[in-house]
Every structure is written in structure tokens, then in C-alpha cells.
Image (spheres, rainbow, N blue to C red):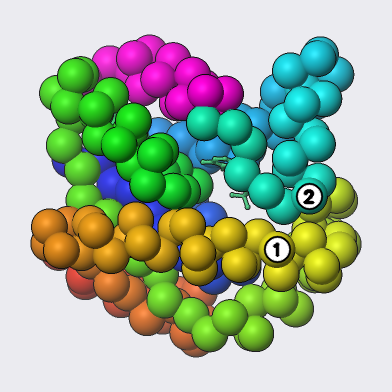
Amino acid sequence: MDLVFFGIQGSGKGTQAKKLAEEFGYDIFEAGGELRKIQATGSELGETVRSYMSAGKLVPLDIIMRVVKEAIESYPADQKILFDGIPRDKDQKSGFNEIMSEVGRDFKCVEIKVNKEACIQRILKRAEIEGREDDADEAVIRKRMSVFEEKTMPVIEEYKSQNKVIEVDGGGKIEEIYDRLKEALNL
Ligand code: AMP
């Protein structure tokens, strides 16, 4: 069973995803990371991707879905995948569900729930450490958060109505959250 992680920027979702992947043998597909790789090539596509990412907007549907489809199809059936950062709106959800059912992969969702304001300082700190340009500007962070609330929350709600979502309180120390996460997943 694959996992799809949801959480607002700075929720600690990526940290928890890495820990879980390491302990239980998931391969992580990180949408933002894949897009940053494309951006780094400096190609025309990379420049298009940069123009969206630097504004905190979602890159166009055809670009992200091509990247995701290619990745999913490349995984052997017995390799569990942990998706981080996809699907982020209803159109991506439709495309994602379709690709997953085509290749016969099933998934559960995890929502890391946190207080929004507390996330902003965490993200600015991460920008200092990792040098991510889309993390350095508070206005861009707020834009990404509003995209999450307006476009991604409805996706989570739809999955909730299908009982596919496990909610985890993302407050506190990394190890405490991780213990709650494993308990919620019966791991
Ligand atoms: P993240 O690292 O997940 O915060 O993503 C950083 C940026 O990459 C986002 O603000 C978007 O510009 C872009 N991005 C990441 N995932 C997606 C996605 N699924 N669809 C469109 N754009 C995305």
C-alpha cells in the first residue's frame, strides 16, 4: 500500500516522510524536488517551471502529471511509494487516481495537521539552511499556503469522504510526531 502525505508548507511533512521511508522501505516521490531538478537543468521547460515556483504557484497540470506518470510507471510493483506534494488540486487528483488505478497501485493518505503561523518561521529557517529561493520570501510562502488552503484542502476533504485519510497531530517534537504517525498507521 502506497502513502500520500499532505500537510501545509512547514508542517514537518517532509521530515516525517523521510523517517518513515527509511524505516519501512518506501521510496519517496517528492513533487517539489522533482520540479527543482527540472528547474536546475536550465532548459526552456526548466525556466517555465521556475517562473511558477518562484511565484509560489502550482506549475501547469500537463507538466506535473507527465513527471508523476513517468515516475510511477518506472517503479516495480513491489516497491512501496510515499508521495509528497502530489496531488495538490482536484485536477491533479483525478489524474493521479487514474494513473494509480491503471498501474494497479492502492494508497492511503496521511494528513499532518499543524498551526499555520507556526510554520512560517520554520520555513524561513529552512531557506537559510538549504538555500531554497522559493522559501526565502515571506510573501511567496504565504502565497503557497493560500494555494494549499484553496486548492489542496478540498482534495484532502474528498479523500476524507472516501475514508482514505489518516490524520496526525503535527505539533511537538519530531520523535513525538513520528511515534503518533506510526501508531496511526498501525506500524
Ligand atoms: P514544495 O517543495 O512541495 O513546497 O513545492 C515547491 C513548489 O513546487 C510549489 O510552490 C509549486 O510551485 C511547485 N510544486 C510542487 N508540487 C507541485 C504539484 N504537485 N503541482 C504543481 N506544482 C507543484
With respect to residue 73, does 100 lie above or below?
Answer: below
Beta carbon at label 1 within 8 Å of ligand 1: no
Q: Is residue 72 magenta?
A: yes
Q: Nearer the viewer, residue 53 or 125?
A: 53
Q: Which residues are magenta?
A: 62-77
Beta carbon at label 2 within 8 Å of ligand 1: yes
Going by the image, does 38 lie left or right of 116? right
Disc 2 residue type?
A: Ala
Residue at the image position 28 percent from the left and 24 percent from the top: 99
- Give coordinates of residue 10: x percent, y percent: 61, 68
Q: Which mark is residue 55?
A: 2
Judged from the image, the secondary structure of the residue bearing numbered disc 2 is: loop
Residue at the image position 20 percent from the left and 43 percent from the top: 107
Quadrant containing the N terminus is top left
Please identify the dominant SS of the magenta region.
Answer: helix
Residue on which the image places disc 1: 143
Going by the image, does 102 lie left or right of 80? left
Q: Is residue 97 magenta?
A: no
Specify the quarter for ligand 1. Answer: top right
